[in-house]
Each structure stands twice: as C-alpha cells, then as structure tokens.
Amino acid sequence: MKPVVQQEATGCAIASAAALAGVSYASAKKAAKELGITAADPSLWSDTTHIRRLLSHYHIGTDDAETPFTHWKDLPDRALLAIKWHLEKGTPYWHWVVFIRDAHGEYVLDSKKALKQNVRTDFGRIKPKWFIGLT
C-alpha cells in the first residue's frame, strides 16, 4: 500500500482514506465533497463520523467503536490510528495515520506533507491514543 500526501493542512483523514482506497488525494477530496465533507471542517479531525462515511463510500468497513491503543502487536492488520491527540478548548483533536501489517511487514502511512518519508516504521516516536480497526 502506498501513502497519499495530504494537500491541505487539515487533510489527513482524506489522505488516509485515499491511501486505503488506492486513489489520489484529488479523487478522495472530490468524493468527500460529494458527501459534504471538507478538510476545512474541524470535525473531520475531532470526530470519527466523517472518516467512517468516506471509507464506507470506498466499501471499506470500520469497527463500530474506537479501541484504546495498548501495543503495536495488538493492532489488527489494517487500522486508522489517532496520533498527536490533544485538547483545544475542551475539544479533542488528532492526526489520522494508517497502520498496515502485510507481506512487507508493519508500517504506518503518514500523510503529513513535511515528512521526508511518509512510510514510517519509527514506532517508538508514534504515540497512538486509540484506533479504529478496518475490514
């Protein structure tokens, strides 16, 4: 699976969905817009509803609930991870990344544009708060 780099400062959910669906950022952004989802909407990174709807559009199923992160070995083979979790004026926010376990090993697809490498294996530096399993 290949990473998709976010083209907007707040487009990590769109980029994560694009990577999972195997489409470009522009294509996922267009699909999101048709669903009434935009990167400018803060609830895209403070609520799970929008990302679940966008993934459903691509026929990617999600677990019904978020699961607290305990250890990398406990993750399913595909999961959305909430990292950089923090509160702003009482509202939780996070950055979405995709965890993959496949024939190539375990890695995280991080859409952040400023990264030199968007495929990450530096698990000690990534601090997930919780995850959503993908089917």
Image (cartoon, rainbow, N blue to C red):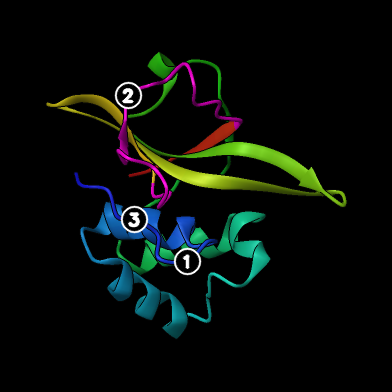
State the separation of the CA atoms marked 1 and 3: 9 Å
Q: How many marks?
A: 3
Residue at the image position 43 percent from the left and 84 percent from the top: 34
Q: Secondary structure at mark 1?
A: loop
Dot 2 or dot 1, earlier in sequence? 1
Please give the residue where the numbered disc 2 appears in the rendered image: 121
Q: Secondary structure at mark 3?
A: loop
Dot 3 or dot 2, earlier in sequence? 3
Q: Position of residue 86 (x, y in %)?
A: 72, 40
Which quadrant is the C terminus positioned in?
Answer: top left
**Given the image, on which type of amino acid does mark 1 rest?**
Glu
Q: Which mark, residue 5? A: 3
Mark 3, Cα crowd under 10 Å, few <14 / some 14-19 / many 20+, is many
State the separation of the CA atoms marked 2 and 1: 24 Å
* Magenta residue span: 111-129
Q: Position of residue 94 (x, y in %)?
A: 62, 45
State the separation of the CA atoms marked 3 and 2: 17 Å
Please give the residue where the numbered disc 1 appears in the rendered image: 8
